[in-house]
Amino acid sequence: MKEPTVMRGKIMPKAKDSKLRISLQEPETPTLASISREEALARFLLMKKAQGVRERTINDYRRVVTLFFRRFPDAFKSEEDLSNSVYQHMAQKIGPNTYNLRLIYLKVFFNWYIEEKILQKNPLAGFKRKPPKSRIVEIKPVALRLIESGQVPLARQTDEPHDNIQPLGSARFLVWPRIVFV
């Protein structure tokens, strides 16, 4: 039996003439179609975990990327298919917060694909965040009377120079310093 030799990280059987042969070929880089989506996601999440990302964030990455995988199972056949699928995914009628979460998580995931030399270009490269919709918050009349009477101060001063206004609140409602009375 031939003794194995190590060549570029691969174990190769020793040549018949017993001379060490060195391969100058670069190891194969994975392509979009050659790596499974599940394997790519597992490697990406492991890298994020190694970077110290919180478990909640890792679960959010998993949820957003898995949703994209489920909706577009054929997206990873080519970069063109991927771009078209991403455009369809982002064009859905969703709120700005959902859009921004998808954008952030998928953009980071595809940037990792680029770092791994699996993708050439991020399909979300030119996308920008959407501004969140303004919300009208209802303040109950009882709370409003307490605020107006001064029984519930809107804010208190602290000794900390970088953050001198602290919001005050109770278990029933939280009052922030900026309230617009219409």
Image (tube, rainbow, N blue to C red):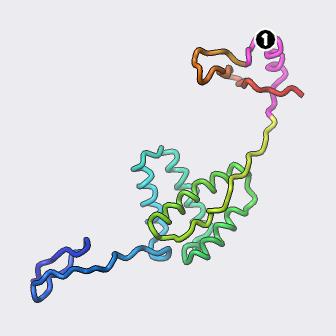
Task: Count neighbours of disc 1 (C-alpha within 10 A) and say few if under 14, some if 14 to 19, many if 20 or more.
Answer: few
> Residue at 55% across / 77% down in the picture?
77
Is 151 included in the stretch rendered in magenta? Answer: yes
Q: Secondary structure at mark 1?
A: loop
Question: Is 2 on the left-hand or right-hand side of 53?
Answer: left
From the top left corner, tell me how far across and down residue 140 is, in percent. 82, 24
Which picture quadrant has residue 21?
Answer: bottom left
Measuring 67% from the left and 20% from the top, which residue is drawn there? Answer: 168
Residue 51 against residue 113 in the figure, above or below = above
Q: How many marks can you see?
A: 1
Q: Which residue is mark 1?
A: 150
Q: Is residue 142 left or right of residue 13?
A: right
In magenta segment, residue 125: no
Q: Quadrant of the N terminus?
A: bottom left
Quadrant of the snapshot with the C terminus: top right
Magenta residues span 137-154
Tell me the amino acid under the disc marked 1: Gly
